[in-house]
Amino acid sequence: MTDVTHIPAAETSTDSDSALTKAFDPQAIEPGWAQRWRSEPFRADATSGREPFTIVIPPPNVTGNLHLGHALDNTLIDTLIRHRRMAGFETLYLPGMDHAGISTQVVVERQLREQGVSRHDLGREKFLDTVWEWKAESGGIILNQLARLGVSADWTRERFTMDEGLSRAVRHQFVRLYHDGAAYRGERIVNWDVAAQTTLSELEIDREVRRGKMTTLAYRLRDPQAAASNGEMGEIRIATVRPETIFADQAIAVHPTDTRFAHLVGQEARIPLTGRYVPIITDEAVEMEFGVGALKITPAHDPTDFEIGERHGLARPSVIDLDGNLTGDLVPAAFRGMERFTARKAVVKALTESGDLIEEKDHDTAIGLSERTKVPVEPIVSTQWFVHMKPFAQQVLDGLEKGEITLTPERYGKVNSDWLENIRDWNISRQLWWGHQIPAWYDDQGTIYVPSPENPDLDCDQDPRYAHLTLRRDPDVFDTWFSSNLWPFSTLGWPDVDSEDFRRFYPTQVLVTGYDILFFWVARMQMAGYSLTGQAPFQTVMLHGLYLDEKGQKMSKSKGNGIDPLELFDQYGVDACRFAFAFLSTGGQDIRHDPRRFEQGRNFANKLWNAARFARMRLAEATPGLTGTDDLTRYVRAASEVPVGPMPRSRDILAALKERDDLGLADRWIISRLNAVTAEATAHLNDFDLGAAIRVLYAFTWDEFCDWYIEAAKPALSGGNLGTLATLKAVLEHILKLLHPFMPFVTSEIYAALGHRQQLAVHTWPVQSADLHDAHATHAFDALRAAVAAARSLKNELGISPQDRLNVLVEGELASIVHDNAPVVEAIARVTLVPTLEGRTLTLVEQGVTVRVLLDGTVDIAEWLGKQKKRLAEFDKQIRQAQGKLGSEAFVARAPAEVIEEERRRVADFGAQKQRLEGVLAQFG
RNA sequence: GGGCGGUUAGCUCAGCGGUAGAGCUCUCGCCUUACAAGCGAGCUGUCGUAGGUUCAAAUCCUAUACCGCCCACCA
């Protein structure tokens, strides 16, 4: 099953007969592999019969450059995909891009402006041609940058939200929503981006608290006999932060139970600076405690006022135009045409002069900014297309309830459902040109025509049924997210539900993205998925945190604190970066940039590279006359007694090795450890915990394989032990497989350099096997390690140069193991094991072994003695603690048996060590 | 106003019910023939604070402080 025949074989990027360079140079090997994975992509085979595993890319903006968020997304996706591919799934990593309505239009308009041209000069059609030209030339850089990351995407399935199929999907969606009554056109208060000249959805607005002024104004009553409760005769006071909008006021509102104003309700008051009177009304929405307890109602310029206005049947005249200037007959001539913020100051000045301004004080107010243009959003009343989301949200909520979609980390499940529960209608029309033009037509009477469900692809102005009418198409386009919410299935062929890809690869398995677009994208895909395809679009949502700068701040263009992943690639190599991303992504926590993690990754790649270099040298030495890679492979297969066949599995190789009689303790130990680590890493990968997986693999590879196994294997290798040589190679290759999803470049390169023709990416993921567990080897090698560490420590204590030999006596319960492996211990500790030592000794007591060296005159015994006495006290403490627990009836009665057993073992272990240490100290009286 | 996350070694972070860990930093010694992007030996923590649950708490619960984030129609 790993013989993935649909992946074309190609020459590896390295001539495997050439020596590996001493230091790993990522730049030398990465471009070759990246190029190969781009030009010979990992094509998903819809007919393979293997279980599918699909992840669609969060489509980056076509205008975009790779930033750390993308790098993180795609590293995690590719790691999962590479693992699942090796594990035998039919994997599909579907790449593509989003047309990104506003962003793209803004980019192209800016370029045109440099040439002194506006989009209106060109007209819609020509402008769109220009955008497509721009896309052909400059768009999609990001996909090449992504390829550099080494992603194993299926580039033959690349999609774009405005390509033909996806555009068709968008149209079908709209037609269906319209005829189901979910999509409707209505006059509502919407968010207007004055700079971009388009409406925005709630989500496209960032709230920012800004220091502003709250002004208290006096509105004169028509009936001068009436009085406000505060004693002011003939007026009612209101508070506002937008005095420039008073000209559009339609009422003054107080709370129905507010006794202070009860006698004024029903009266009329005059808007300052005008001669216009508005009624005083009551509404539940008024907060009695806030401000002065009364507010002006301006339905056209405030969402709350709009709702109050609807309840009371108020008119909603506007005094602000689409450019944000004061306009209309209601505005006194002096302010007409003024920009809204300039007008605010002018109005305040006029109110002060007229004596209607009672008070002006500082007030923090949350204002809405367009997330694109950063300009304060203007609420305006406008006729737009909306989608009634509630029923769709309910479908998702039911699905979440049933566990059809799992979020990881789990806590986002609640965030997800809370948002869905409070969902509001979605304004889907945008006053842009770049995007999917809304397939709705209007006749002269304003009647709406939308293509029929039977034939959604037929434009209404081409529909014979309407031939007698003059139809005009809606000029607006859809919100970009109205197409990206279809992404998991529009990319797979929907609305053709019979298409092979859709049937085979939908629903997808995992969605990987940052939690910051949970509402924008994830929740909307859920709703679209359930409503249009009848099922959840993905099983698992894996959310990662935000990538922050070194100070822990969000990266943003305005702050200029962005970090360019491409520079990180140059500086550390892509593998190192991927290592860092995986290492840093734990539990959906935000990630603070830390160059040290990238250095760690670079060092690790180098470490692996050099371990491989060592193995390769030893393999070459052991097989004189070996020239070609085939010879090498054949040799090692023979050495490990595995029948030559297509791609032997790691487990089989290790199992065969284990049967050999020429393995040493270290060989048996590393095989057992490798087996355990394989199980751990695999479990973490299956749980989507990539951080945990890479940590386990890093620690094992560096600390156990490189620092202990390779060192311990050296004597046997020098002695020509073929079992050890085969173990070295098998374990290394096994490690390469485990690390491949995380660091595909260096592992592929090494694997090729070891003589393999078939690239590593298509090999089988190693599985753990109970047969490979060797408790005895683990126990024994631990004793050996303790002895070596103690011997080294003593040499250090004596100030003996590491190269110089030293006579060492090993005693203790496990001393025989050390003696049985004397050559190994002597080699890696650089000591000579002796049966006896005459005279006083410097000694270290460890678990299972006591290590002694002869004391010479140069050592400060007092210091050493002090340390040993501390240790003795520590042993005592440990023994006392353990005995204390064992002496407690509650503990013995309630703790699990293995915990009790562990405490017994501790008493015995520390007891033995204490006894040995006391013996040692006895020689000093 | 509601919700969520964080607080663990000098720094950045894992661990999240059974003897406190990593990388970097720091100290000492090493160019030991895979690797100085390295090797060996060390030093470093009342796991924010206060209660509670438990045989056992960094880990669970309840408060609380401080940082950060998200949501929200107090003009």
Image (cartoon, rainbow, N blue to C red):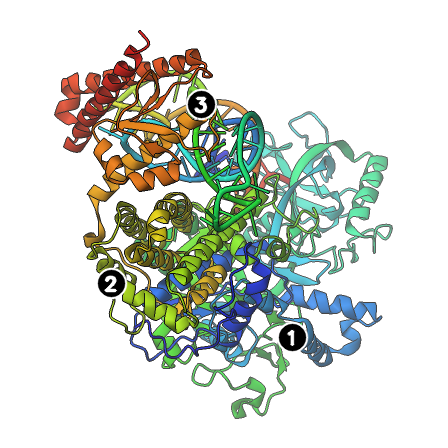
Looking at the picture, how far across and down is residue A543, in whole percent?
45, 52
Which residue is farthest front? A838
Please name the amino acid that badge 1 sits on.
Answer: Pro
Nearer-N-terminus badge (3/1): 1
Circle 1 residue: A475
Viewer-side label of 2, 3 = 3
Looking at the picture, how far across and down is residue A882, in whole percent?
22, 20
Please name the amino acid that badge 3 sits on.
Answer: Leu
Same chain? Circles 1 and 2? yes
Nearer-N-terminus badge (2/3): 2
Looking at the picture, how far across and down is residue A46, in whole percent?
36, 78
- Chain where mark 1 sits: A
Crowdedness of circle 3 by 10 Å Cα count: few (<14), some, many (20+)?
some
- Chain where mark 2 sits: A
A487 or B16: nearer the viewer: B16
Q: Which mark is residue A652?
A: 2
A355 or A557: nearer the viewer: A557
User: Mark 3 to mark 1: distance in Å?
Assistant: 86 Å
Please name the amino acid that badge 2 sits on.
Answer: Asp
Q: In this picture, is A428 found above or below A217?
A: below
A398 or B34: nearer the viewer: B34
Q: Residue at x 34, y 76 (%)?
A: A503
For mark 1, give the secondary structure: loop
Circle 3 residue: A798
- Chain where mark 3 sits: A
Quadrant where the N terminus of chain A sits is bottom left
Q: In this picture, is A117 found above or below A332?
A: below
Q: In this picture, is A32 found above or below A164?
A: above
